[in-house]
Amino acid sequence: MAAIIEGIGLTKRFGFGDAAVVAIDSVDIHIEERELVMIMGDSGCGKTTLISLLGCILTPDSGELHIDGEEIDLNGQDLSLIRRQKIGFVFQLFHLLPYLTALENVMVAMDIAKTDTSEAENRAIELLTRVGLSDRLHHRPAQMSGGEKQRVSFARALANRPKVIFADEPTANLDSRQSDNLMNLIQELRQEHQTTVVIVTHHEGLKENADRIVYMKDGKVIAS
Amino acid sequence: MKSFFLKDMQYRRARVVLTAIGITVLISLILLLGGIMNGMRIQAQQYVKSTGADIWISAEGSGGAFIGFSLLIEENMAPLSASRELKEGSLSPLIFAQARPIIHGKSTKAIVVGYMRDKYGGPKQVPEDMGRMFEASEFQDYRPEDPIPLEVIVDEKMGLEIGEQITIGTDAVKVVGKTNSLMFVLDTPLIFMDVRVAQKVLLGNYPRVNMMIAKANENMEPEKVAAFFDASGDIEARTMNQTLDDIISYYVDEPMKAVQFLRVMLWIAAGLLVGVITYVTMLEKTQEIGVLKAIGASNNYVMSHLLKQVALISVVGVTLGFCLSYIFAAAAPIFVAINLVESIIVAGISIIVCCGSGYLAARKVIMVDPLIAFRGEIDGGMFRHSPTVAYSDA
């Protein structure tokens, strides 16, 4: 299988001078199409920083990034365009917009991508129905459980048919039953949508779901 | 999803309503103050224009009619009467002085206008059903010991009935007629009387007047006539337009400098109100903005939503302020003349000021780092913009 994402010599420092911290240190990483990769490691080892670099949220101090076979010009290209066309994000705290319903939260991602409203609505309903929330379309985040919110978050991440979904500790705020349900859903959705999924997690119990596990320590990939 | 920004506003409706109310009040005050100044300008010109005279003469050093202290003596008048520059018989003596008449036992502000009934300076007749003109004296052959009826014509808004008596100085004068709303600055009513009556009640029968007014000869330009008399060095002469400029400058523009300053301050306050509230709201929304950017929203997308909100609040606030100013004007105890065209311009500028300040606030906040989406908490709502921001975002 071809690499959907490839990082070569990625390095990221925070701070300046003596206070500078090397968060990611010359990391080489590649992720194959339709893989489910988990990035694991201790707190502060650079997991979130790595997916921020791979997801074009952060720009590295040095190194190269290739997404879907194309080298990303990190200082010249419109990175927001890459994010809305090729990448979906799922956050630990869901980050749904509190004033919008589940349906509207999914539609927002497509509104950003300038998708026609009726088309966006149909797709949002389809996705929310697929994640088991057809009876929660018009509920606001405050009216939903953590598991439901995370499923809305996944539906939003899938809205623009991304090549890769990055999920940052998606089960951290869910109980074990909700976590298992979510992982099953992720597996199903990955197959259905032919999407690559990269999950950052501490949760050892999720390992069995991964095709591959990337271990990190002190900003470096120590095993893959 | 066109109503995305509206739903956000609905969610934060308390703040939206308070901001709109703030703008409404500030804009209505700005327009009201402008209306007060307009009203003063109109009233300041009303009397001068109503006389029909185009030459205004006052004592040398007075600074012009209505401005400084002026008493004209017989020696000033003699050459004027014979002047070929003035329309024959148009020279009219005039007394124009502030007074505190006692009306219904209460001291009231008013301006006494003493003039000759068949000359320039006041109404030549009163409207039907509003009494009659005062008895005229013989100005030229007048002797102080001659009896003159102490009669006056008052403005209908003064609430006096025909036949009522009011006291000016130590003299009781009788109301014999009324005029239709001829006021001076700040709704000061005019009380018209014969020039000899004015000399009696104000000057203790001293046979002097404040000014002389006249009409320039038909084949002469008023500017040249005024300049000709002014050059004599014994008197000051102005055209009607110069006199109007003097009055507006002296009675409106100078005293209203503070009000003008206040209007500018209110504008700045309106801009700051929108800017600060937008900025504070944006700080609260920092994480939302970060999430939107993380899921692919460009800076332009976020900015357009923020600007739609700012523009809507500004337009609603300014429109309500526009309407409210007319309600305030109708209820104001003084004459307020809100100029529609000026108000529309002021409203337009106000919307630009409000939107501009909102834009500046939004521009600062949209630079938020989308990395914040991976963080659990916003640091007290004051998330600092990291130098690691994805600066290639459009």
Image (cartoon, helix red, strand yellow):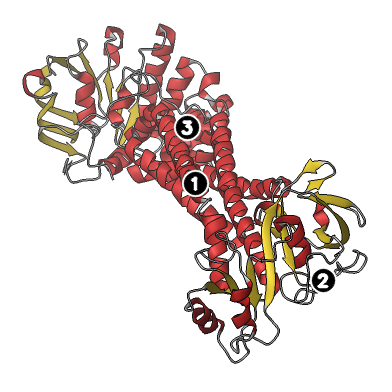
Name the residue: 75% across, 67% down. Answer: B195
Q: Position of residue B42 (x, y in %)?
A: 64, 62
Image height of B84 relative to A52, above or below:
below
Chain letter for mark 1, please.
B
Which-is-in-front pick, marks 2 and 3?
2
| Residue B205, label in figure | none
| Distance from the alpha carbon under mark 1 to that under mark 2 | 45 Å
Circle 2 residues within 10 Å: few <14, some 14–19, many ≥20: some
Q: Which residue is mark 3?
A: A105
- In the image, B350 versus B337, the foreground residue is B337
Circles 2 and 3 in contact, beta carbons < 8 Å: no
Which-is-in-front pick, marks 3 and 1?
1
Circle 3 residues within 10 Å: few <14, some 14–19, many ≥20: many
Q: Quadrant of residue B104?
A: top right
| Residue B137, label in figure | 2
Q: Which residue is mark 1?
A: B258
- Marks 3/1 same chain: no
Sequence-earlier tag: 1 or 2: 2
Chain letter for mark 2, please.
B
Amino acid carrying label 2: it is Ser
Circle 1 residues within 10 Å: few <14, some 14–19, many ≥20: few
| Distance from the alpha carbon under mark 3 to that under mark 1 | 52 Å
Amino acid carrying label 3: it is Asn
Quadrant location, the C terminus of chain B: top left
Image height of B337 relative to A42, above or below:
below
